[in-house]
């Protein structure tokens, strides 16, 4: 596999990660399938994940399980392909996007997605701080500073330490929430969630995908680039396991914790079972530990990709200072923690959601262009080529990809004019993203005959 001349060597022992957006060296690509599954299942198991039970209130438990299965089936293929892309070429998705959206488009998207990642880091820290403040009043800002500092420290040391953190704390996290679940079912009378009213299947599928699988999928390559390279003679079951692990991990947590939130809502009137910890006679600290781990697990996968995405804004072609990545971890993490302390993230949730609406068409277009153009066969150095003239910032297919991305955002915000029964079951955001992706692919095939799939370098 081709390498850049300034590619850093893999460290022999855990240290501060200074890799930046350079390709991951083969020596550092040793993440196993089990670690990949654990990382993404715990990243999805936020202290706020049970809120999906509140959002889908009025849905029976059986219907809740079905809507999650349908969401998984819809989002599984793009999530599998994105996970595989990181093993094909060990670079982050926003560097991959340079070949599709051009250096100019990818740079702008990198800035937007950095804001999204940092914003969700702050939002989750704010939620965690509020929960801990209710469990143990009187400490106020201390919880925010502790959560922010812990998460910054984890990301500061990079993926090598993050992988160990997820693996070593997985059992502790499960035990904490098992204690809370035991208290829930032991203290309160069980009430089976029943369907109330008509279920808007399509909207609920869109909601779950934007809340979970398709909000994470575009950064799957950021983690899978640390997995062993995919080779032509690789066993099919091994390849499938690496492709499935991130998406199945994300949705497993959504199903389990979302169902727990739905059941707890009917039994106690409170979806957030972490707050039950304040009533535990001896094990109140269990809830606090569970919340701290849940927030840290999720926010590590918010801050780490946000930092690497911000590093992708560097288009000069010059090698960044080796300590730029850890410095940005501190700066971006401190900024997001400050937003949580100030409580201003509540005013920009709408903005974050609007930016998130870019993810569906962005994900689909990126995947289609990657495999149609066979970019995985190109020299890695081609992803780092520096534009010398203005037109080179938006070389084909960038204008077409950007146009279809914007069309997807506009179309997603429109109410579909379809029969009511169809509107009830149609996941409109997914369908609109698929529609513009089909048009994008047809444009590649027919509207620009000079374009041909890139051959192996």
Image (cartoon, helix red, strand yellow):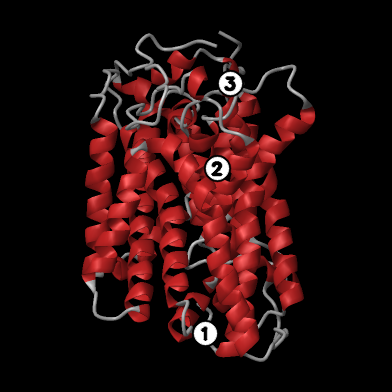
Choose the circle earlier in sequence order: 1 or 2: 1
Crowd band around label 1 with a 10 angstrom C-alpha radius: few (<14), some (14–19), many (20+): some
Q: For residue 203, say whether it is visible.
A: no
Task: Report the residue marked by disc 2.
Answer: 363
Choose the circle earlier in sequence order: 1 or 3: 1
At which x and y percent is residue 56? 61, 76
CB contact under 8 Å: marks 1 and 2: no
Crowd band around label 3 with a 10 angstrom C-alpha radius: few (<14), some (14–19), many (20+): some
Instruction: Tell me which residue sits at (54%, 14%) in the image.
Output: 378
- Badge 3 marks a residue whose secondary structure is helix
Give me the C-alpha separation between circle 3 and circle 2: 16 Å
> Relative to 231, is 121 on the left or the right?
left
Q: Which of marks 1 and 2 is in front?
A: 1
Q: Which of 352 and 25 is in front in this view?
A: 25
Task: Report the residue marked by disc 1.
Answer: 270
CB contact under 8 Å: marks 3 and 2: no
Instruction: Tell me which residue sits at (43%, 14%) in the image.
Output: 381
Task: Report the residue marked by disc 3.
Answer: 376
Instruction: Tell me which residue sits at (73%, 60%) in the image.
Output: 69
**On the rendered image, what quadrant is the C terminus found in?**
top right
């Amino acid at each position: 596999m081709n390498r850049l001349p300034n590619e850093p060597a893999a460290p022999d022992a855990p240290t501060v990660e200074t890799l930046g957006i350079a390709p991951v060296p083969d020596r550092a690509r040793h993440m196993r399938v089990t670690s990949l599954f654990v990382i993404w299942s715990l990243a999805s198991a936020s202290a706020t994940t049970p809120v999906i039970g509140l959002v889908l209130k009025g849905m029976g438990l059986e219907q809740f399980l079905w809507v999650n299965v349908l969401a998984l089936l819809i989002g599984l293929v793009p999530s599998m392909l994105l996970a595989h892309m990181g093993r094909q070429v060990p670079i982050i998705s926003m560097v991959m996007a340079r070949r599709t959206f051009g250096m100019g488009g990818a740079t702008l998207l990198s800035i937007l997605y950095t804001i999204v990642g940092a914003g969700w880091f702050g939002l989750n820290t704010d939620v965690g701080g509020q929960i801990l403040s209710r469990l143990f009043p009187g400490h106020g800002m201390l919880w925010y500073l502790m959560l922010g500092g812990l998460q910054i420290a984890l990301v500061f040391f990079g993926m090598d330490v993050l992988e160990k953190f997820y693996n070593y704390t997985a059992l502790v996290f499960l035990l904490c929430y098992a204690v809370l679940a035991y208290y829930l079912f032991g203290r309160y009378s069980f009430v089976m969630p029943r369907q109330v009213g008509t279920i808007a299947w399509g909207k609920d599928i869109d909601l779950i995908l934007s809340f979970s699988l398709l909000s994470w999928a575009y950064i799957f390559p950021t983690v899978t680039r640390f997995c062993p390279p995919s080779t032509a003679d690789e066993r099919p079951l091994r390849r499938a396991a690496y492709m499935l692990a991130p998406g199945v991990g994300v949705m497993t947590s959504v199903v389990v914790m979302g169902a727990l939130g739905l059941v707890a809502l009917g039994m106690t009137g409170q979806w957030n079972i972490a707050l039950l910890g304040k009533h535990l006679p001896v094990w109140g600290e269990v809830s606090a530990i569970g919340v701290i781990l849940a927030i840290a697990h999720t926010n590590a996968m918010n801050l780490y990709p946000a930092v690497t995405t911000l590093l992708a804004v560097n288009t000069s072609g010059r090698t960044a200072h080796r300590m730029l990545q850890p410095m940005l971890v501190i700066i971006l993490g401190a900024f997001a923690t400050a937003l949580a302390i100030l409580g201003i993230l509540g005013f920009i949730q709408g903005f974050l959601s609007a930016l998130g609406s870019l993810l569906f068409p962005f994900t689909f277009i990126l995947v289609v262009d990657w495999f149609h153009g066979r970019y995985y066969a190109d020299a890695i150095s081609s992803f780092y080529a520096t534009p010398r003239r203005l037109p080179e910032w938006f070389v084909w297919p960038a204008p077409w990809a950007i146009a279809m991305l914007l069309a997807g955002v506009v179309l997603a915000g429109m109410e579909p004019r379809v029969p009511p029964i169809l509107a009830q079951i149609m996941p409109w955001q997914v369908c609109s993203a698929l529609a513009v992706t089909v048009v994008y692919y047809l444009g590649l095939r027919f509207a620009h005959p000079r374009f041909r799939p890139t051959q192996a370098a």
